Amino acid sequence: MAISEHIPIKADTDVLAARQKGRALGLQAGFASIDITLLATAISELARNILLYAREGEIELRLLHEGGRRGVMVVASDQGPGIADIERALQDGFSTSGGLGLGLPGVKRLMDSFEIRSLPGQGTVVTAVKWELR
């Protein structure tokens, strides 16, 4: 049976809840403490982006079992304005909000796999996976 959590993101407290649930799944997956921290950081960045750009959305966390290893999949989705230039949004230092521009590029570096789908005016879906170290 797959373990899956859906956390609506509508306020700062939801960012914390998603981060805590991610930590708990990381523990279940057998992650080392550093990998739990990396996972929680990625979840925080994605949830904050939802609040900043779309105002609301959802973080789905799913425990994975594949080929004898375990991992955690994070799916961040929203119905916000979307991203017009994904390639540029993934460049360090690029920001449309006046921030440091570390969010999406940072998440990509923290996770083992990263995929983003977005259409202007239709929202964004980011899917990222962190695997346990073997």
Image: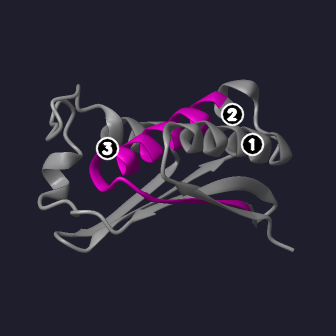
Q: Residue type at mark 3?
A: Leu
Observer-side mark, 3 or 2, equals 3
Observer-side mark, 3 or 1, equals 3
Would you say 66 lies left or right of 80 here?
right
Callout 2 crowding tier (Cα within 10 Å): few <14, some 14–19, many ≥20: many
Callout 1 crowding tier (Cα within 10 Å): few <14, some 14–19, many ≥20: many
Which residues lie in the magenta part?
A: 37-63
Q: Which mark is residue 36?
A: 2
Q: Which mark is residue 26?
A: 1
Q: Residue at x 28, y 63 (%)?
A: 80
- Give the quadrant of residue 96: top left
- Residue 69, percent from left and from top: 77, 56
Residue 78 visible in rendering: yes
- Give the quadrant of residue 13: top right
**Residue annotated with mark 3:** 52
Would you say 107 lies left or right of 53 here?
right
- Give the quadrant of residue 78: bottom left
Callout 3 crowding tier (Cα within 10 Å): few <14, some 14–19, many ≥20: few
Q: Residue type at mark 2?
A: Ile
Q: Residue type at mark 1?
A: Gly
Distance between the alpha carbons at the discs numbered 3 and 1: 26 Å
For the residue pair 19 and 115, the one nearer the viewer reads as 19
Which type of secondary structure does the marked residue at label 1 adopt?
helix
